[in-house]
Amino acid sequence: MSILAGIHPIHEALKAKRPLDRVLIAKGAGGPRLQEIIDLCRIQHVPVRFEAREALDRASSTSAHQGIVAFGAARSLADLESVMHARLLVLLDGVEDPHNLGAIIRSVNAAGAGGVLIPDRRAVGLTDVVAKASAGAIEYVPVVKLGNVSQAIGKLKKAGFWIYGIDERGKESYDGLNYAERSVIVLGGEGKGLHEHVREHCDILLRIPMAGQIASLNVSVAAGVVMFEWRRRQALQELDGRNRS
């Protein structure tokens, strides 16, 4: 059973009609946003219980739950085949910080990408911290767990995707090329970057030039920068195609 903590993640879960077993609200907590959640629970027949705040602290393993905790079935994962229709995917090679994963999922949703691919080992899973950091986007973004990253990249290539690895040693600048219509952006874990065997399977290694003294960006920031550059390039190419026709 998964646990969601915080007003926004639980509100988005209810809007998306995600099955919830029950919702706990801290005694004395109130306000219009909590009342909206209570109303949605009544409509969807989700039991609501009022408990001491300490009980919510124990249930969520954090005191930063904003007075509300929900229990639901484990977040269902997508399979690789279900996202093969996407034009843009993001593959994370060992991201371990749940805040980074949540922020990336949020950016994936904002950029209109089709899903996030994560390895099933040496990487953070879909925790309540990830859900909260995603600001509800986790309800709308397919997440695929990969048993073998290299094999998955091979399948993606056969399906017509180009694989772009983000690496500070890359020879190409992220804003200096036209991306393929079907692209996978690959980012490494915090402090480690891309693993060698993953780097070798990328078609092109891209760097994000730095103007300051720090050599690289936080992985969630880097993901957003490159995704929105891909989106900008695709819009320009589509506009050019319409002008030519």
Image (cartoon, rainbow, N blue to C red):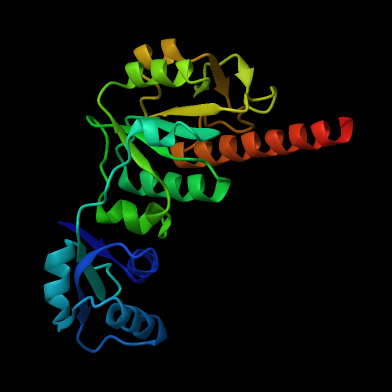
Q: Is residue 228 visible?
A: yes
Q: How far across and how far down the image is residue 212, in percent? A: 60, 33
* The image quarter in which residue 2 lies: bottom left
Residue at horizontal 61%, vertical 40%? 228
* Quadrant of image for the N terminus: bottom left
| Residue occupying the far right of the picture | 244
> Residue 230 location, x and y as percent?
63, 34
Where is residue 48? Give x, y as percent.
20, 80
**Does residue 24 appear to the left or right of 218 in the view shown?**
left
Residue 45 drawn above or below residue 10: below
Q: In the rendered view of the protein, which quadrant contains the C terminus?
A: top right
Q: Residue at x 51, y 30 (%)?
A: 216
Choose between 165 and 63: the one closer to the eye.
165
Q: Is residue 234 above or below residue 37?
A: above
Total marks in image: 0
> Percent position (x, y) of residue 159?
48, 20
Q: Is residue 240 left or right of residue 89?
A: right
Residue shown at the point (19%, 57%) measured from the top left: 73
Q: Quadrant of residue 44?
A: bottom left
